[in-house]
Structures are given as C-alpha cells and as structure tokens.
Amino acid sequence: MDIDGDTDDVTKSVQVRFVTKLQPPFKAPTTSVALPSNLTRLGLSAVVNNLLESENDEWKPEPFDFLIDGELVRMSLEDFLLAKGISAEKTLEIEYIRAVAPRKEEDPSLHDDWVSSVDGSSRFILTGCYDGLARVWKAAGVCTHVLEGHNDAITSVCVVKAIDNENDTNLVATGSKDKTLKLWKVDGEPLADNLKIGTYRTLRGHTASVQSLAAQPTGDMICSGSWDCRINLWETESNEGDIVSTKKRKKGSKEEESQSEGEAVSTLVGHTQCVSSVVWPEHGTIYSASWDHSIRRWDVETGKDTLNMYCGKVINCIDVGGESSALIAGGGSDPILRIWDPRKPGTLAPSFQFSSHTSWITACKWHKRSWFHLVSASYDGKVMLWDLRTAWPLAVIDSHKDKVLCADWWNEDSVVSGGADSKLRISSETCIL
C-alpha cells in the first residue's frame, strides 16, 4: 500500500474507521483499521482508494479530503489530534469527501484586451472586456454573441433573467467606463458564431465610470455602483417615461430593434468613494462595498443603510452566501480574503481570514449550493478555492499569466476567470458536495 509518512522511526498507530456521505461506488467498508499516526491526507487517500479497490476491481484512484469533527485535515493525524486535544486511544472516525480541485483545464478563450468581468450564473458564460465588447460563450473557445455598443471599456456584466424560455432568450446587462449601462437580449441558438447584436436599452444617469452591477432575484430591476460614489436602481422593462427611438437602424443585413433609454428610479447615497461592488441577494436588500473602506447593507424600500461595517481597507469585491446565505465575503487592497457574519452581535471582526494570496484580491464568489465553498481571484495571477473548514486553499489555479480581474462558478462544477492576459479560463470537473 502506497502511503506517505516518515518510516525511519517506529511510528505510533491509531485505530480509524472511515465514513462518508458519498453514494456507491464511493462507500468503503466501515470496519476499523490500524494506521500509522504520521499519515497525512495523501496517505489517507491512498488507504481509502485501496479499500474501495478491494470492493471493486474496476475502481480508478480518486483524490479525497478528510474531516475529523467537522474540520478538514491539513497535517499528519498525530499533529491534528495533538492540536485538537483528541485522544489517540479511541477509534477515530474520519469522514472522507471527494477532493475539491479542478480535474481539467479547458483551452483558453481569447479576447482582444483585458477581461474585466465574468458571469457564470446561466448556461452560458458572459464576459466583459476592455475593448468595449461583451461576449457570450457556450463552451471554451466558442463565442456565440458579441455585444457591441459601448464606446469605452466594459467593467461589469450581469445575466439579469430569462425573458423567453421557449426560445431560450436571456436579458443581460453591461456597465462601462462610458458612464452607461446597457441591456441586451441574447437568443439561445444564434444562426452563426460571433453574432453581433445591438443594445436593447441604454440606462443613463451616472456621472462617472460604472464599476459594478447586480440584478434583483426576479430580474425586474438592476443596481449599479459607480465611481460617482452612488448606487443607482433601474427598472429593466420600458415605461412611459422612457425616450424611445423613432427609427430602426440597419447594420449590414441585420435590422436592429428600436432602442429605449431609461433613467434611474432611485439612488442610494452614503459612500464617499468608488462603489466597487454590489450584490442583490434578496428582493429588498442590497449589499455594497467601496473604496471608502466600508461595506453597507441597504433597505431598498427606504433607501437607508441598515448595516455599515468599517473594514479598514479599500474593498474591491464582496459576495453574500455561505450558511443561510448570510455570510459576507470580501477582498480588497491587501492579500487577505475576509468573511464576516453580520448576525453575530457586538462585533464586526471577521469570522474567517484567508491569507494565501500575495496581492490585491479582485473577486470572490460563493458556491450557490454549498455553505463552505468559495473562490477568489487576485492580482497575484492566481485563483484559489476555499473551504471554511480549513485555513489553507483547497486548490490553486495558476493558469493565468498576469493579473486575474474576475472569477465565478459555472455549471456548479467549473471555475471561470478572466484577466490581464486577455483570456477567459475554464477549470472544470470540480467536485462540490
């Protein structure tokens, strides 16, 4: 049996029983076995693979992670038991799970400039680029739509909602340094790749670059954060107050739809620097982060902030998720990814801090189905996968050759990211849950 550990000295042993919530063929026999106490996760993984192979001749080795009392093991069994004050005399119950790490790196999807933003919440991937174009990708290297209309770099993109399920049509939004937001209708099956489509609506009202976008869960409204320090709220459908263009314009052989322009229906005021990130996780609540070192929670109906956390750092990105969708993840002008739990009374200190990055953090996203998992991206060129049950990253994705500017989950088992190397990268076959 190929197991790791120092075998120079006589090693203590510990009785272990492996348990799992995984379904067959991942269930190993639950009888206890004696193992050297200097085994680390690689050695434990070898043991479990041997147990599974004994039950199934066609078993192919699989990397596993291990939990003791709900915490991931990232040291030898002996060191872990000593650190946690757990007796080595009794039979130790160890839960094993499939290791969370991408099994495959897809070919890069090339852009003409920096990839500033990415949204993987739909069946396709939406990217924004410094060349002023947004793009829709159905797979690695396969661009189906090019969204053409901004006259400066795109800084944020957002899939708003499905508007025609029969034809698989989605409404998406983009924000730009040109101070506008634009809405686009993206059909599910275009007649050709790289189909250029025009704007459905243009939203004007910011006096500086739009930096961040988020859609209300129903998709009836979107909000935008800007360098003008304001958060504007917009309706996604036209109303009587919109200025509607009177003519349809022809572009090549394609006739564009009439455009309309909209104004913000309300504005949230309070930040004193750039609003770098907005999240709209539930109908009446928006979260925002700013270069003024604060994270705020807003009541949409009253326009007032109900939480104002001073973080001591410029904040570049936030996301809300985790346990009961209540935890706030944030990253900014230092290498530390922080997690706050605003439900805890009396303190606004982070509940978790992860410090494996070496430069500014540009993006963080919770996995939609997991209380524990999230992804982060950084100027250090790396994307990292995290689990709240350990302080070390589960995986480090090092496929970019320059600063990583954005990251998201896609199809639940893939991580998508973009950066200053002008590439969208897809790291797939990541086992979550």
Image (cartoon, grey):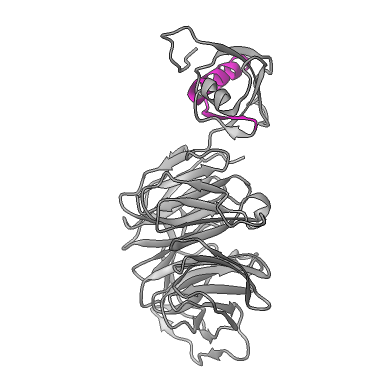
Q: Is residue 126 visible?
A: no
Q: Quadrant of residue 194?
A: bottom left
Q: Where is residue 392 in the image (x, y as percent from the top left)?
A: 48, 38
Q: Where is residue 241 in the image (x, y as percent from the top left)?
A: 60, 91
Q: Quadrant of residue 309?
A: bottom right
Q: What stretch is highlighted in magenta?
A: 41-69
| 15 or 3: nearer the viewer | 15
Q: Position of residue 403 (x, y in %)?
A: 34, 54
Q: In this view, does 292 lie above or below 399?
A: below
| 370 or 198: nearer the viewer | 370
Residue 60 in the magenta stretch? The answer is: yes
Q: Which residue is drawn at 38% across and 55% down?
A: 360
| 71 or 432: nearer the viewer | 71
Q: Is residue 365 above or below residue 285?
A: above
Residue 327 in the magenta stretch? The answer is: no
Which residue is farthest front? 346
Q: Can residue 431 be seen in this view?
A: yes
